[in-house]
Amino acid sequence: MEDDSLNIATETKSVKSLSEATVLFAGDSGDGMQLTGSQFTLATAFAQNDLATLPDFPAEIRAPAGTTYGVSGYQLHFGSVNVRTPGDEVDLLVAMNPAALKVNLSRVRRGGAIVINVNAFKPHNLKLAGYGDTNPLEDEELRKNYRVFEVELSRMTEEALKDFGLDKKVVDLSKNMFALGLTLWLYSRPLEPALDWLSHKFASRPELLNANIHVLKKGFHYGETTEDFIIQYKVAPARLEPGVYRAIRGVESLALGLVAASNKSNLDLFYSSYPITPASDLLHQLSKHKNFGVKTFQAEDEIAAIGATIGASFGGNLGVCATSGPGLTLKAEGIGLAVMMELPMVIINVQRGGPSTGLPTKTEQSDLLQCMYGRNGEAPLPVIAASTPGDCFHAAYEACRVAVRHMTPVILLADGYVANGSEPWRIPSTEDLEDFSISFAHKPNQVVDGQKTFLPYLRDETTLARPWAKPGTSGLEHRLGGLEKQHETGEVSYDPENHEFMTNLRADKVMRVAKFIQPTEIYGDSEGDILIIGWGSTEGAIKTAVDRLRDHGLKAGTVQLRYINPLPSDLGGVLGHFEHHLVPELNKGQMVRILRDRFLLPFAGLNKVQGQPFKASEIVDSALHHCKKHH
C-alpha cells in the first residue's frame, strides 16, 4: 500500500527557474564540507553552469570540534549568466552545527534559506559555539529574516545505515552525503558525478561504497518526498564559448600550465618545493605527471628547494619551485643568486595572510612589494600574476616563456583564493599555445685573440638574454656564481664601472620584457569617470563591479595587470583617459605605491586584509563614494 502523504508531497512540488544561485556548505573540518562542496561543484559543471568557488579552510589543524575556529566552509556561485565571483550573498546555507551557523549567518541574504542539522544543536555544542544557554533556533528574528529548515541529518543518516554494520563514527561522517543529496535535489543537480566519484573512491571498500551511495540517494529522495521543501530550483546551462570544458582548481591549472610549457619547449620539468600552505598541493599535482617526464623533489627546507631549482636550471632543465610568503623570505638569497647567474627559472608564490605564520589557510595579496624588492642589492626580475583558477594555466605557461626567452628568474603570483578556487575551464589545444622554442648554445660564440671562445654573458640584441649552455658541452666551459661578472667574459670583476654597467644591464633586460606584452585591454568603457586597476585574484569582483557601476550611469572601465614588473608600456596612455583611478587590493596598498611611483597620479586605494576576497559590492561602494567625493 502506497503512503498517500508521499504522493501529496510530490504532487505539490513546484519548480522555479533561477538565473544564478549561491550555496555555502559549512561545518566542522571533520564534517567533509570541502568534499561536499567539490562534489556539488562537479555536478554543477556537469549541468553546464558557469561557476566560481571559495573553499574556506580553518587555520588551525586540530581546532576543537564544535568551535568557531574549526569551521570549514565551501561557497559556490553558479548560474546561466556570466559568473565571476563566489557570490556576495548566500542564497542557501547548509549548517552542520551551531558554530557553522554563527560564523556564516552574516553571509546569508535576508530572505535566504538555511538548512540546519538540528541534531547537532545540543547544549554542549551550543556552548562550544559561544551561544551559551540560548538556542538560536528559538530566536524569532532568525525565522523572521530567513527561511529556516530544521533537518535531522544525523538521525536520518543513522536510520539509513542501521543495517550496514558500520561503526558509529563512520556513520556520523556519512551525514555530509545526505546533505549533498538533498542539495543536489533542491537545485536540480544530477547524481551521476557523485556516484561516479564514490565508485572510484571506494572501489576497494564495497561496504563504504554501498553505504555512501545509499545515504546520498536517501538525501535526494528526502527532498523529493518531504513536505518541508515545496519548491525545487532549476538553473539553465550557461552560454559558454564552444569547446571542451572541465571544472578546474587553480592549483591543478598551474600544474598543467607548467607541464604544457615543458612539453612545448621540449625541456624536462624539474619541480622542487618544501611543504607550505597553500602551495603544497602543487607538489601533489605535479607528482601525478611523471608520464610527461616531470621530476618532483620534496626538499628538506626552503633554501634547499631553491638551490635544487637553480641547479636544475643550470643543467638545462625547466626549473620551477613554489612557496608562500614565509618561504619566499627564506628563498630571497637564492633568488638573488639566480638573478646574478641569469638563469631561467620560475618561482611561484601562492600568497596567504601574514606576517609570519599569520593566516595560513586564508587569502591575501600582501607579498607584492616583497616580490618586487625583497632581495639584497639591485636584483630586479619579472613579476606576473594569475587572475582566475583557469588563468593559472596561461600565467604559468607565460612565466616559463619569459624566463627562458630573457634568461632570468620570474616570480609568478597566485594566492589562496585563486589556487583553491574552481571555475569552468575551456581546455586549450596544444596548437593554440604560443610558440616556445629553445636554443641552447652548441659552439663558441666569439673569436678572441684569434681563438674561438665562449663568452657566457654575450647578449642577444633584442632581449639582452645571455646564452644557455648545458654543463659538459665541449668548448663551452664557463663559470657561474654569486660574485659580480665581467661584461661578456663572465669572469669575476670588482671594477666599479663594470658593476654599475652590469647592474643597469640586468635592469634593462627586465624592462625589455615590456616589448613582448600585448596591448592593454580595457573591460567596460575605454574612457570616462573611473578606471579600476586590478591584479591577481581581484579580477572577477572588479569586472562585476564595473558592470554594476555602468548600470548606475557611470562611465567605468577596468584593466587587469598580468605584468607588474615591467608594467605595460601603454598603461600610462590608458590611465589618461579616466578622471579617477581606484586600485582594490587584498593588502594595505602595495600596488598603489608602485603605480604612484611610476605615474605620479593620485591613485585611490581600496584595501582589505580579512583573509577573504573582495565582494563586488565593496568595490562598487568605494567607487561611487570616490567619484561623488570628487564631484
Image: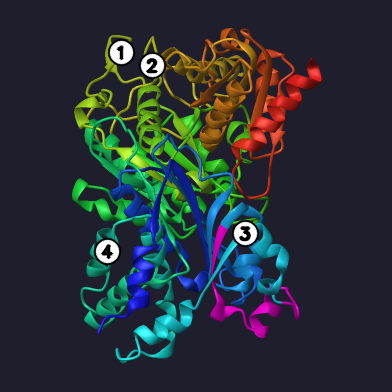
Residue type at mark 3 is Tyr
Report which residue position mark 4 lands on.
197
Marks 3 and 4 sit apart, C-alpha to C-alpha, by 33 Å
Label pair 1/2, CB-CB below 8 angstroms: yes
Tell me the element at label 2: loop
Report which residue position mark 1 lands on.
446
Tell me the element at label 1: strand
Residue type at mark 4 is Trp
| Image mark for residue 624 | none
Residue type at mark 1 is Gln
Relative placement, left or right, of 416 versus 462 is right
Report which residue position mark 2 lands on.
458
Give the image location of residue 436, x and y in percent: 27, 25
The part of the chain drawn in magenta is 113-134
Q: Is residue 306 visible?
A: no
Give the image location of residue 188, x and y in percent: 35, 55
Label pair 4/2, CB-CB below 8 angstroms: no
In the image, residue 359 above or below residue 311? below
Q: Is residue 428 visible?
A: yes
Instruction: Indicate which label's residue lies in the foreground, 2 or 3.
Output: 3
Tell me the element at label 3: loop
Report which residue position mark 3 lands on.
146
Give the image location of residue 155, x and y in percent: 46, 84
In the image, residue 247 above or below residue 26? above
